[in-house]
Amino acid sequence: MYQKFDVVIVGAGGAGLMAAMQLPNASVAVLSKVYPTRSHTGAAQGGVAAALGNLEEDHWKWHMYDTIKGGDYLVDQPAAEILARDAIDAIYELEHRGLPFNRTPDGRIDQRRFGGHTRNYGEAPVRRSCYAADRTGHMLLQTMYQNAIKNQVRFFNEFLALDLLVNEGRVCGVVALEIRTGEIHTFHAKAVLFATGGYGRAWRVTSNAFACMGDGMAIAYRRGIPLQDMEMYQFHPTGLYKVGVLLSEGARGEGARLLNGKGEYFMERYMPTLKDLAPRDIVSRCIIKEVKEGRGVNGEDYVYLDLRHLGEKVITEKLPDITEFARNYLGVEPIREPVPIQPTAHYAMGGIPTDNDGRVVIDEQWTPLPGFYAAGEVACVSVHGANRLGTNSLVDLIVFGRRAGKHMARFIAENDHVPLPPHHEDFAREMVDHLLTSKGGESAARIRNELQGEMLENVFVERQEKGLQHAMDTVAGLQEAYQKVQLQDKGKTFNTELVEAIELGFLLECAAATVHGALARKESRGAHYRLDYPERDDVNWLKHTLIYKGDGACNARLAYKDVILIDDPVFKPKERKY
C-alpha cells in the first residue's frame, strides 16, 4: 500500500509530537508501534528542567554548566547552550498549549530539585525541575497529542517501521508493517524524522517499556548511517529491585535518602555537597560499591530508598505514582517501609548523530543526509555526553524536537519529493518473509533472554576487557543464531511473535554497537566505567565514537570526531567533584 505526505515522523513520543506541532501547514503522518499516549515518554516522572528561577535565583548558564559537567565533558558545548537557553521558551510554549504543571501558591510553575542541578556553578542544589506530580511525561504526551489532533496530523497507530528509503542522495520515505493486517506499507515523504526512543530492553533489569527495542537506531545503522557514543548507556540508581521499574529522582529531590543494609545514610560519605542528588552515574557506582563491600541489604545486591520521613501528605500529593509502583510490584508500603532498589538500565546517551537542527549527519565532517532528521533518545545531538542529568531528557526532546520540526518546515517548502528507489519494498518484504518461512528451529525468546543476561552481567555499571570481550563473542553468536529463528505463528493478523522477532533483530544491532564502543574506549568517563582503566583520559579520549556497520555478524568500523568546546574557562574540562 502506498501513501504520500510532506513529512513522515516515526515515533509518537514527546520528540515526534513536538516536531509535528511545528508543521501546522504541512501534511504530516505519524507512525507509532503503540497508541500515541502509551509512548515511553509517559514513563518520565519527575520533571523537565528549565532555569525559570521561580522559587530561587537560577540562570540558563548554570544549567548549561551542570549539563556539561554532568556529561563528564563529552558534551558538545554549543548544543548544551541551546538546550539550556531554549528550555525556558519551550516550557512556556507547553504551558500555553495546556500542560497542567504543579503551581506555587502565587500561581507560577512550581519547581523541585534534581540530581546534578546546582546554583552558581556547583555551589548547592537548585530548584530547576518543572513538574506535574510524578506524571510529567504522561501530562506532556497528553498535551501534545491533543495539539497534534487539532493540527490535523494523521496518525498510523500500531505500525512498525522496517526500513528507511534513500534515493538520489536524499531520504524519501519509510517502509512499515501494519501490525493489525500484516500488510507492508510505503510512506513517501519529502522529509523523515525518527523519534523512536531507546533500546533499554537489551538489559534484563530495565526501566524501559517493552517497545524500547532500538528500532530507529538499527534501521539507520543498517542503511550505513553511523551510531554515535553507544557505549554511553545510563543506569539509573533507583530501579525497583529485580523489576527495574523506575522510582523517580524526584523522590530524592523531595528529600528521600539512600540507606545501606546497616541502615547508614551512605551518600554523604561519597558526595558531601550534593549527597543523594549527585549525578546518576556516580550514585549508581556508590550503590554497587556498598553492595560489593558487603553493605547490601541482608547481603543481597540491593539497598533501600527511604521516603518515610517525608510524611504521608508529601508522598501522596507529590509522589503518587512511584509509591503505587512499590506497593503493586513489591508489596512495600513506602509510608511505613523503605523500598528495595538497585541500578536499572535507563537511557541511551548515544544514538543517531545529528546537528543542532535535528539533521542526521553521517561522518566526522558533519555531512548531513538531506531529508533525514532524528530527535529524542534515538538521536545523539550530543547534549548528554557520558551521563545525562535527570529531567534533561524531556528538555532534549522538546527543545530539539521543536528545532527539527521548524527546520523540516523550511526544508519541505524548498524541496519536492524525490522518486522512490527501485524495488523499494524488497528489503522489508524479504526480512518478514524469511522470519515467516524459516525452519531453522531457533527460539527468539531464548536469544533475547541470553542477550539480556549477558548485557546485565558484562555491560553494566562496571565494565572490563574480559567481560566486554565475552559480551562481544556472545552477541556475535546470537546474531548468527538469529538467522535461524523459527516462528510458531505463521499468520498475518496481529502476529505479535513476528513483531517481537523483528524487534529482536533491532536490539541485537544496538547491543553489538554498544559493546564495540565500550571495548574500544579505554578510559572511564560518566556512565562508561572501566575497572581496568579507572581514570578519565582527555588526552586520548575527549572525542565521540562513530560506529559503522560492517559485513557479517557483529562486524563494525569505528571512527572518531572531536567534542566541540567553546572558548570559555568556565566550561573547560576538569575533574568532576560534587
Image (cartoon, rainbow, N blue to C red):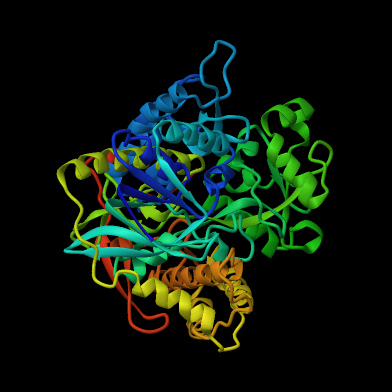
Q: How many marks?
A: 0
| Residue drawn at point x = 45 percent, y = 25 percent | 97
Farthest bottom residue in view: 440
**Which quadrant holds residue 122?**
top left
Q: Furthest-top residue in view?
A: 106
Percent from the top left, x then y, of residue 384? 40, 49
Residue visible at 58% across and 29% down in the picture: 132
Instruction: Give left or right: position of 280 versus 343.
Output: left
Q: Is residue 147 above or below residue 478?
A: above
Q: Is residue 275 above or below residue 94?
A: below
Image quadrant assignment for residue 402: top left
Q: Nearer the viewer, residue 355 or 241?
A: 355
Residue 313 left/right relative to 10: right
Residue 434 shows up from this direction: yes
Q: Position of residue 182 (x, y in %)?
A: 51, 66
Residue at the (22%, 44%) spot, across then down? 412
Q: Position of residue 163 (x, y in %)?
A: 37, 66
**Foreground pick, 343 / 44:** 44
Please name the residue shown 47% across and 82% down the image: 476
The outermost residue toward the front is 1
Q: Closest to the observer: 566 or 25?
A: 25
- For residue 515, above or below residue 568: below
Q: Can residue 475 be seen at all in this image of the molecule?
A: no
In the rendered structure, the answer to whether residue 60 lies left or right of residue 129 reads left
Q: Quadrant of the N terminus?
A: bottom left
Indicate the position of residue 496 as horizontal and vertical percent values.
60, 66
Residue 372 to residue 558: above or below: above
